[in-house]
Amino acid sequence: MAGRLIYLIGPSGSGKDSLLDAAREPMAARGCRIVRRVITRSAEAKGEAAQAVSVERFDQMQAQGAFALSWSANGLHYGIPDEIDQWLAGGHDVLVNGSRGHLPQAQARYPDLLVVLLSVDQAVLRQRLLARGRESAQEIEARLARNAQFADELLAAPATKAPSVILLDNSGELAQTVSRLLQRIDREHACA
């Protein structure tokens, strides 16, 4: 039996990297692999533990077919290594840090993917984004509005077009979010 792609998405500041780090061990105990993305940014940049490469190297890797999925966002290039196809074929579930904008392409390639939409209370997210200091207050408000619209559209999509979606709130303690993620994934497997 083939594994399932678990496609984690959510707004900047929602805690995707923290969730991946905290869930790594319990997900591995369930036979799930968590993918390390390839990103065109400095290895010293804060955020997820990704493989940092130059744009030139990324382009070479892409031309060689090294990515199962790839996209560009916010001036960076992101790639999911093609080894996930071997893991999926071997019966392993695979958790990736995906892109909301690339969801249609991911769903086209992996029609039974499971989307985990990480959400955060707007007030909490606003505070997290303000604390990072990367954007102006106006840019943050625009980001919050886009985030709300995306979530509404995804959850309102007809079942024939929408993938399976787990809505996961990360406004509170991270340990609780990890626990809810594991429970929901276990429930999805029981229903499959």
Image (spheres, rainbow, N blue to C red):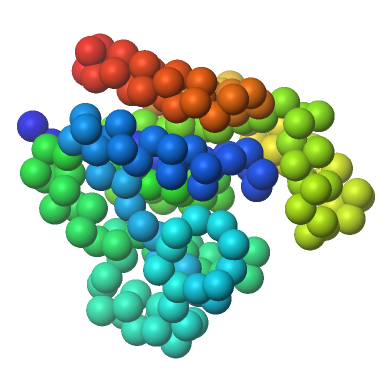
Residue depicted at 24% across the width and 38% down the height: 28
Please indicate, yes or no, whether residue 176 appears anywhere in the rendered image: yes
Q: For this rendering, which residue is in front, 85 or 161?
A: 85
Residue 177 in picture, x, y percent from top left: 51, 25
In the picture, residue 51 is in which quadrant?
bottom left
123 left or right, relative to 161? right
185 left or right, relative to 4? right
In the picture, residue 107 is in which quadrant?
top left
In the picture, residue 180 is in which quadrant?
top left
Image quarter in which the C terminus is found: top left
Residue depicted at 44% across the width and 87% down the height: 56
Q: For this rendering, which residue is in front, 131 or 75?
A: 131
Residue 98 in picture, x, y percent from top left: 46, 48
Residue 10 in picture, x, y percent from top left: 58, 39
Q: For this rendering, which residue is in front, 132 or 149?
A: 132
Image quarter in which the N terminus is found: top left
Please indicate, yes or no, whether residue 69 appears anywhere in the rendered image: no
Residue depicted at 36% across the width and 16% down the height: 183
